[in-house]
Amino acid sequence: MMAKEKKLVEEITAMEDDFAQWYTDVVRKADLVDYSSVRGSMIIRPYGYAIWEHIQKELDRQIKETGHENVYLPLFIPESLLQKEKDHIEGFAPEVAWVTHGGEEKLAERLCVRPTSEVLFCEHYANIIHSYRDLPKLYNQWGNVVRWEKTTRPFLRSLEFLWQEGHTCHATDEEAGEETRRMLEVYADVCEEHLAVPVLRGRKTDKEKFAGAKFTLTIESLMHDGKALQTGTSHHLGSGFAEAFGIQYTDKQGKLQHVHQTSWGITTRLIGALIMVHGDNRGLVLPPKIAPVQVMVIPIAQHKEGVLDKAHELKDRLNRKARAGIDESDKSPGWKFSEHEMKGVPLRIEIGPKDIEKKQAVAVRRDSGEKIVLSLEELETHIPFLLEDIQKSLLQKAKAHCQEKTNIARTMDEFKQVLESNPGFIKAMWCGERQCEDQIKEETGATSRCMPFEQEEISKTCVCCGKEAEQLVYWAKAY
């Protein structure tokens, strides 16, 4: 049995040896996904889907609190509708999947499987918005989209993924701008306060902004290997889509005006962020707020009289304060420890004959491995505090890692040296020219992640060309 227990952990490739393989091992062995028969598609298993449900529940709550309503729009988009906004379709053309036949019959017009729903919302808004009294329109959709990616990886980049997409219409450009920033802050709150994933807030460069948008705001996170991950985006669409689709309203003076729009979304790639920010060589490490099981009770010597009864009693008591489970399988305690560590359960409670005799239980933290002896009488009081401390500690640890992996570069030589020695975020000044942005990517593989809202002047010249700098930009290699 000991050999099997040891093998369970050994089957995860060490992240220091091969980070990509470590990620794949964790995704599969923690029962998050399975592969389907379609390349690049994934089956999200119950444990993985439960994590998504907890993220979804919190985000849905905050979306509704900000006045938005949930709707659902079709999966298919006629080609003629998609073509209405030129910049938008050009941005998505390489990733679009097309339906050309219905049964044996060739369709008169191709149908796009939605890569995003801007044009569908625009068509609908053009039909239902007529007066200033109809504004603002604050809609949100939970659904799935398809993007025909060349290189795929579970959660991070797949042909089909789950997501949320908000689409709103406003009377003024200013109102749309406020909405764009407000929803980015909602995403940042969910990431930091619930996923314990620190984020960098900022604006995308024109090269990296959403196709057809006036501007794009983003939250960026840093993974354990020093690569960045875009964890959420919010787009100010301006009036471009409204002009293309004829979304107009009569204002208070009786004049026809075009609406100003936003769109914003997060996806199941947040689960990928969770894995790569908090995971270790034993598997997942889940923040308590989104963990499907927050506390797992493990009976020790469960064949002995009274042990299982006491374990069930503890589980029932804990369920009043947390999401608690019990593992009463016939596997050894060591195997159970490894399995629930692999799945990232924040806290396990060990209870055996000696513990019962002493009226105590042993709590073991997944984040630090610390063992804490707790009185059975005080269990309900201590467990919520422990879970809260784990949540805070995970965020603090991730913030410290991000700070350690954030460096400054004033020249291209410094930029390359830092990227090689301590990969992560690089703060460097930029002249604003697309040519320099392209050159940095070509020479280093790093892309602009965002222009942070809180600007600094670390140099007066562009890191690439040496001309006068306009903006501080965070750069990194990214997923």
Image (tube, grey):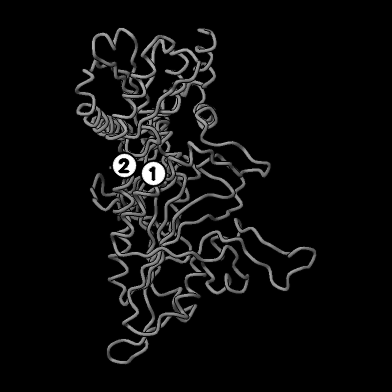
Q: Residue furthest right?
A: 104
Q: Is residue 418 visible?
A: no
Name the residue tied to disc 1.
54
| Quarter where residue 386 is shown | top left
Residue 271 at x, y percent in the picture = 44, 40
x 30%, y 53%: residue: 186
Q: Earlier in the sequence, mark 2 or mark 1?
A: 1
Which residue matches tag 2? 194
Residue at image coords 44%, 11%: 303
Amino acid, disc 2: His
In this view, 435 is above or below 307: below
Q: Are marks 2 and 1 in contact (CB under 8 Å)?
A: yes
Disc 2 vs disc 1: which is toward the camera?
Answer: 1
Q: Position of residue 280 (x, y in %)?
A: 41, 24
Helix, strand or loop under label 2: helix
* SS state under label 1: helix
- Is residue 147 shown left or right of residue 66? right
Distance Cα–Cα, label 2 vs label 1: 9 Å
Closer to the camera in the image, 348 or 267: 348
- The crowding category of the residue bearing disc 2, from other C-alpha atoms within 10 Å (few below 14, some 14 to 19, many at least 20), is many
When the figure is inspected, residue 139 is found, relative to residue 476, above or below; the finding is below
